Amino acid sequence: MHAFSRLLEALVLTPSRNGKLDLVADFFARAPDPDRGYALAAITGDLDIAAVKGATLRSLAAERVDAELFALSYDFVGDLAETIALIWPSSSTEATPPLGEVVETLSRATRPQALKLVTQWLDTMEPGDRYALVKLATGGLRMGVSARLAKQALAQFAAARGTMIAVEEIEEIWPAQTPPYRALFAWLEGRGTRPSGHALAPFRPVMLAHPLEEDALATLDLGAFQIEWKWDGIRVQAVSDGGVRRLYSRTGDDISTAFPDLVAAMDFEGALDGELLVGHFDGRALSIGSFSDLQQRLNRKSVAPALLRQYPACLRAYDLLVDGPDDVRALPLAERRIRLDRFAATLDPARFDVSPVLNAADIAALGQLRADPPHGLIEGVMLKRRDSAYLAGRPKGPWFKWKRDAMTVDAVLMYAQRGHGKRSGFYSDYTFGCWTDDPSAGGVLVPVGKAYSGFTDEELKRIDKFVRDNTVDRHGPVRVVRATADFGLVFEVAFEGLNASARHKSGVAMRFPRIARLRFDKPPHEADRLATLKQLLR
Amino acid sequence: MIANPILVPRPEGLWCEAGRFFIDPVRAVDRALITHAHSDHARPGHAHVLATRQTLDIMAIRMGERFAAATQAAQWGEMIRIGDASVSFHPAGHVLGSAQIRIEANGQVIVVSGDYKRRADPTCAAFEPVACDVFITEATFGLPVFRHPDTRDEITKVLDVLARSPERSVVIGAYALGKAQRVIRALRDAGYDRPIHLHGSMIPLCAYYQSQGIELGDLRPATVESGRRGDFSGGVIIGTPSAIADKWSRRFPDPVVAFASGWMRIRQRAKQGGVELPLIISDHSDWDELTATISELNPQEVWVTHGREEALVRWCALHQRVARPLNLVGYEDEAE
């Protein structure tokens, strides 16, 4: 338990991705089975014990000190589990039980038994372990690390032992594995064979495209490629296998519960690769909704019936990976496409259609398509070699994406915050704004977005100095930077799209904003007006 | 409540009418008694300052020789008559020179503890319990969530990082007076004998500690001129809290940012400060020390100042003790 609680703390405090990877891989190397397996399950979100209620522990802790002292402490600390962990009076410190024992005992226990056990453990643990236990036992454990990173850490762990196993291979067998993953670890350590991945409806690693370099256009053999729109929805994999239906994100997370409408329509045997979008069926074809429509369906644990009616989810299919009993990933794209058209013809047209193949006689025509797509959610074109097999990851050569040029706007730096990792100490997170009206007519700046990237290290130093020299106020970690009609720093901000947003004061939210250029030459009153930005909404 | 107490809170600080002096005044006054040299307690511009020799020396280092018109050094335990009051200074265990001040007048004894701690600290004299009618306690960490662990265990964390990643450096943020020297000394006591590099602003205070017989080992300025980047690999660098969060720390190779403070007990505080390695090392009493001290001294009344007054007053109420918050303004209650 102690090693696990140390990992939990270190992950919170380590800002860099590589640092987190090392911590997790190192933990797998040091912790024994089944402890490391349960830790892995905690990271991937496959461990849900919820043996006791947080409120119950809170009142027990309050009884032990005093309700008022507890309330004052909670107010100061701000996190319930941490308050309980810190305030709990320990009678003695004994060797803490290993994580595996805690998990297995708690999962078998009844609620009253669990409460008794947790109380006993809390009495003898040190605060870090108590924190981990409270989080674990109340089902509120979040490690702050993605499932994808955990799998990368597994691959790194294996590599350090001389077993070269690709992350994609781990992802492929992952759905069939269950905590504490003994067979998986044995395989990664070279002690065992590859565990069977024969769970029903497994995830297959997704094939991704490289960006097309503009100077490669001249030599591109356009005729060898199938051209399609590149949609900016959610890339998903819809798998239906022997009655098990699963909708996966491109990282392999199971997102079925968020889209019950689409899952209900997955009446097939096979695996489709496609884009999840919001679409209304007019009796003949699907009419695709906007990004804001799609946003209504994102990040929801449960979906209200009204939302399902108003924003129905659909799938625009790109590819077919499994056709009935046949894994067709090794076939050339041209053949898969014939199968896909046939496969999709049997599906509910209100939920599924096939991404159309586009025609472009030459690069100029392709450029035309890319520059002027027929829908706001299209972010460019895809080029896929007709002879390409469906491969895991991002192989160089068979698939390219050629994105539309980003939109840009001139905005004024308003607030700055310090960055993390190699940027710690630098003011590298910027909030910028546009004018509500001409500043001479009483217009003011309202924030329209935040960006952390796009600038070089040299530019970062210049902005950092500007921020330090022109701070007019501070709110905790945030510096308010001088920004008037005649003095301030103008950024040319590039972004991929704009959504209407009721949560933002400006009424708009940018997608993927980044700093394209520093405009030290430009007086702030020449920055863009909010109205200009709003014209880009569609 | 005690009738006609000999000390009363005023905007300038605690006032003693019998001796016509203030204790730790936040504005310039005619006569000031100063518990210790931290800048919220020791300010320049008073006409006359009475404090321990070490506190006076440190004030001179930090504020210049002319920080007061006249100074007088108090010996530990020496009775000094000021007007109708007699005062004496007793170790508080907070930082070098830090004192509790005992004031006696009109048959009443009040002890102003200033900031204090109870655990062992080889860089200053240990807290001395002084019997009194009224004990004025600090409450910086006056909540039952604050229990400082053993300093040796915290120092071990630093040594572990260096052992595990010898190519990295550990940059420890610590207050320049007291904390920095305590951390250095704890590293030495744990067997770390390599040179320790210091932020420039700490050098005079460390030199003063060494002149007072506190062994701190080989200390060097952490300037890039004095060494190439690689020289800091596997090394310990001590900087001020503001320096570690700033450009200064970027000159060192892949630094692990550590911070030595009682606040590091709370995870989000550490995270917000960008601290990767929190070291729970405090020069203030934790909850157990505060409550144990009150029980041990058993004063008629407890007055609580700067910090979490409410919680400590509540604890006193739960233990049938008379207590009240002083609500003095001008002292840092979250700095450490």
Image: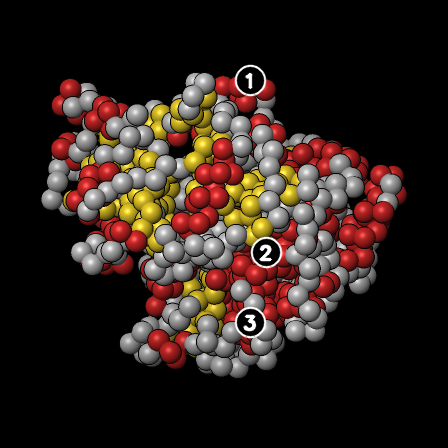
Q: Residues within 10 Å of mark 2 (few under 14, many from 20)?
A: some
Q: Is residue A486 visible from the viewing direction of this image? A: yes
Q: Which residue is mark 1?
A: A306
Given the image, on which type of amino acid does mark 1 rest? Ala
Which quadrant is the N terminus of chain B positioned in?
top right
Give the CA distance from mark 3 to mark 2.
15 Å
Given the image, on which type of amino acid does mark 3 rest? Met
Mark drawn on residue A164: 3
Find numbered disc 3 in the image and state the secondary structure of the residue it sits on: loop
Q: Position of residue B301 (x, y in %)?
A: 70, 39
Q: Earlier in the sequence, mark 3 or mark 2?
A: 3
Find numbered disc 2 in the image and state the secondary structure of the residue it sits on: helix
Find numbered disc 1 in the image and state the secondary structure of the residue it sits on: helix
Observer-side mark, 3 or 2, equals 2
Q: Which residue is mark 2?
A: A172
* Residue at 38% in and 64% down: B249
Chain for mark 1?
Answer: A
Chain for mark 2?
Answer: A
Q: Depth check: A125 or B201 in front?
A: A125
Q: Is residue B152 visible from the viewing direction of this image? A: no
Chain for mark 3?
Answer: A
Q: Residues within 10 Å of mark 3 (few under 14, many from 20)?
A: some
Given the image, on which type of amino acid does mark 2 rest? Glu
